[in-house]
Image (spheres, rainbow, N blue to C red):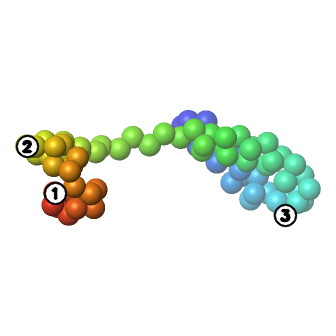
Amino acid sequence: MNERQRLETAVAMLEAQRELVGDAVTDAALAPMRATLARLQQHDQVLRQVTILFMDVVSSTALGQRLDPEDTHQLID
């Protein structure tokens, strides 16, 4: 269990005790945990597999220099 998961579990457990200990105590205890969770979520990295296709169309650079970008795009499409 990582730090984020432990904090989420602790937040859920404190929220479950809200009626027993009251809103003021619960909110005071949760504030730093939620701040830490927000900070951790900003730094979460998601690794994704991607495919990138590169292609070289013969003489496309010379052609692109003579045509408008829209015309080049339409021709290549």
- Nearest-to-viewer mark from 3 and 2: 2
What residue appears at the point 20 percent right and 50 percent down from the top-left corner? 66
- Separation (CA) of disc 3 from disc 2: 72 Å
Q: Which residue is drawn at 64% across and 48% down?
A: 8
Q: Quadrant of residue 52?
A: top left
Q: Which residue lies furthest to the top in this view?
A: 2
Q: How many labels does the image show?
A: 3
The amino acid marked with disc number 1 is Ile
Disc 2 marks a residue whose amino acid type is Val
Tag 3 and tag 2, C-beta contact below 8 Å: no
Name the residue that disc number 1 marks.
76
Q: Where is residue 2 in the image (x, y as percent from the top left)?
A: 56, 36
**Residue 37 placement: quadrant:** top right
Task: Report the residue marked by disc 3.
Answer: 19
Q: Is residue 6 visible?
A: no
Q: Where is residue 61 in the image (x, y as percent from the top left)?
A: 18, 43
35 or 71, which is in the foreground? 71
Tell me: 42 left or right of 70. right
Label 1 packing within 10 angstroms: few (<14), some (14-19), many (20+): few
Tell me which numbered mark, 1 or 2, is placed earlier along the sequence: 2
| The quadrant where residue 24 appears | bottom right
Q: Give me the disc on residue 58.
A: 2
Return the disc, 3 or 2, that comes first in the chain's sequence. Answer: 3
Q: Please say if the residues under marks 1 and 3 sit with CB atoms less than 8 Å apart.
A: no
Tell me what residue is drawn at x 87 percent, y 49 percent.
28
